[in-house]
Amino acid sequence: MESLGDKLKTARESKGYTFDYIGRETNIAIRYLEALETENFSAFPGEPYLLGFLRNYGEYLGLDVDELLFLYRGLKIQEEPVPIEKLLRSPSKVPKILLTVFVTLAGLAAVGGGVYFFMNVPWKKDTAVAAQHSPVAYTLEGNFLERRLYRGDSVLIPLGGNLYKIDLLNLGEAVTLSAPMGNVILDLGQEINVDINSDGLGDVRIGAQDFVRNDPAIGVMLRFDLSTDMGTISEGTGAEILPPADTASAAPESPAGSLSNAVTIFTSSNAYPFTLQASFQGYCMFRWEILRERDRQDRQEQYFSRTEELNIQVQNYGVRIWVSNAMAVKLQVSGGGRTVPLEIGGAGEVVVADVYWVRENDGRYRLILNRID
């Protein structure tokens, strides 16, 4: 049977992924990815971390998570057989009946040990500990706070002479926080700007950096960054929207400078977050870059093959894309309850295009597709 480490390594190498790439995609430290593949379980600070990272890594590689957990538990309870010579002081002088008794007792002890282990698995103990956790209130001092929070914990944020409280309500498929303006839901690696004093400005950026879905035992690592210059907040989303250009002809990120061939995707009285969805029909090099959004990598690129999909969430202003073969990818934009397909070019055509918001002279907004020639 293939070992746990070999199964992970084979799946990773078959996809052509490096530790560095997977670390960026899953937010799992490279040293932990290597430890899982080499079965060096002592590298983890505790078993809840190990189990959480194993689940996330296995899901990312498309493996059967239950099988991975079974292999891990088998390694934990695996014991080398005890030589009969060590059970008996003088094997040659002990009657065969005593040898049978010793072997039988050893087998019963092994079975009993296995039953005890599964009746007292570590994650059950950890869950019980989490259930008994006494809520703690932390105060943001300075411009940021990074803490591991458990259900019931809270963070107090001083702003404008007032103290605003954010509570950790639940840890399930996502992180649910209770803020003065309503509930905030965060997925792993997601960041959201929150208007806690309802003045129309983003007051604090909250990011979920480390948690295991449906396992509250290890809590969640949350980061809170206070800012006085985050722009306006779109209604009902709690997401950051920086003011677009004052006129439709001003788009600093578009070096072409002309919108004469721009295609209008949405029109609205206000700008809002949107998702660019890419479905690949063949091999294609695809690059994308979020525009005007801080704390993002400048550019990302990847080779995609047939049937693969990519969702790019734009919380701010817009996104720039570069496609090696325009017909190898189908694009559509979703936002504000609507989905619109995009046509960017023909077969074999290399295309660079921006999808972003512009503001017209009458104060309304357009989400446009603008090719850069």
Image (cartoon, rainbow, N blue to C red):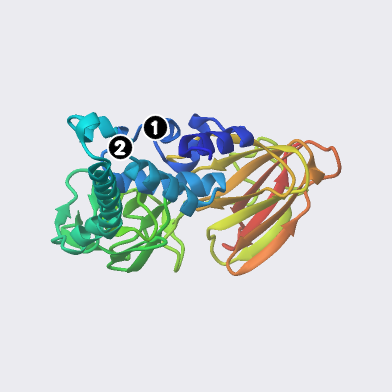
Q: Residue at x 23, y 39 (%)?
A: 95
Classify 10 Å Cα crowding around label 2: few (below 14), some (14-19), many (20 and above): some
Residue 286 percent across, percent down from the top left: 68, 38
What residue is pinned by disc 2? 44
What residue is pinned by disc 1? 35
CA gap between label 1 and label 2 equals: 8 Å
Q: Is residue 201 above or below residue 25?
A: below
Residue 362 percent across, percent down from the top left: 60, 63
Q: In this rendering, would 305 be left or right of 64?
A: right
Residue 292 or 248: which is nearer the viewer? Answer: 292
Picture quadrant where residue 75 is located: top left
Q: Residue at x 63, y 42 (%)?
A: 320
Q: Residue at x 37, y 48 (%)?
A: 52
Q: Is residue 220 above or below residue 251?
A: below
The amino acid sitting under disc 2 is Phe
Mark 1 vs 2: CB contact within 8 A: yes
The amino acid sitting under disc 1 is Ala
Residue 3 showing in the rendered view? yes
Residue 63 or 246: which is nearer the viewer? Answer: 63
Residue 154 showing in the rendered view? no
Residue 9 percent across, percent down from the top left: 53, 33
Residue 285 or 244: which is nearer the viewer? Answer: 285
Q: Is residue 3 above or below residue 361?
A: above
Q: Identify the element where label 1 is drawn.
A: helix
**Marks 1 and 2, the one that precedes in the sequence:** 1
